[in-house]
Image (tube, rainbow, N blue to C red):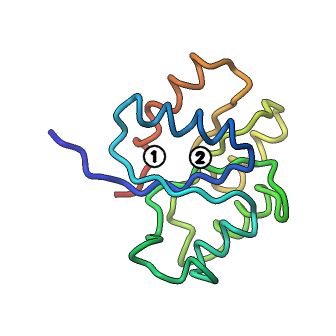
Amino acid sequence: MEHPTINILIVEDNLAHQKITEYILKKNNIPARLFVVHDGQEVLDYLYRKNEYADISNHPLPNLILLDLNLPKRDGREVLKVIKHDASLKEIPVVILSTSDREEDMHYAFSNGAVAYISKASGFDKFNEDLASVTKYARI
């Protein structure tokens, strides 16, 4: 059975982490169109169709958001809260990808609506394994 293509929005300010995430998704044949933004304000502009993200055909709403917690301009924690408190966005699943494996960050993420928390600090093999199955969270 062929999987439908999903739109994944990657929110990552670290270029190396962005490239690793894209590499893992492609290597695991994840059927996705990837869109990338680099800070907390940019993700909100994307989701609310502001500035260069106004054209929905080039910037569709994501079926899944991969959100880093530590972002410039607006922190990922704040972004998660905004998404989950907005009736038009709250149904979009958010998976946290973070270098933090602190219990309080994980608790914050889950208590504010994240569907999963993947630690980048767990090593490449574990990160690869966790990210390879990320589409199970996507809203199709």
* Spatial CA span between label 2 and label 1: 8 Å
CA neighbours of label 2 inside 10 A, class few (<14), some (14 to 19), many (20+): many
Question: Is 89 left, or right, of 61 in this rendering?
Answer: right
Nearer-the-camera pick, 50 or 88:
50
Local SS, label 1: helix
* Residue 10 screen position, x and y as percent: 58, 52
Question: Where is mark 2, residue-wise?
Answer: 95
| Secondary element at image label 2 | strand
Q: Which residue shows up at 65% across the image and 75% down it?
A: 45
For image coordinates 65% across by 51% down, the residue present is 67
- Image location (x, y in percent) of residue 138: 42, 51
Residue under the point 63% across and 83% down: 51
User: Residue flagged by tag 2: what amino acid is it?
Assistant: Val
CB-based contact (under 8 Å), mark 2 and mark 1:
yes
Specify whether 100 is left or right of 82: right
Which residue: 69% across, 31% down?
A: 119
On the image, numbered disc 1 is attached to which residue? 137
Looking at the picture, how far across and down is residue 16, in whole percent? 68, 36
- Against 118, residue 61 (above or below) is below
Q: Which mark is residue 18?
A: none
Q: Amino acid at mark 1?
A: Tyr
Query: Does label 2 or label 1 sit earlier along the sequence?
Result: 2
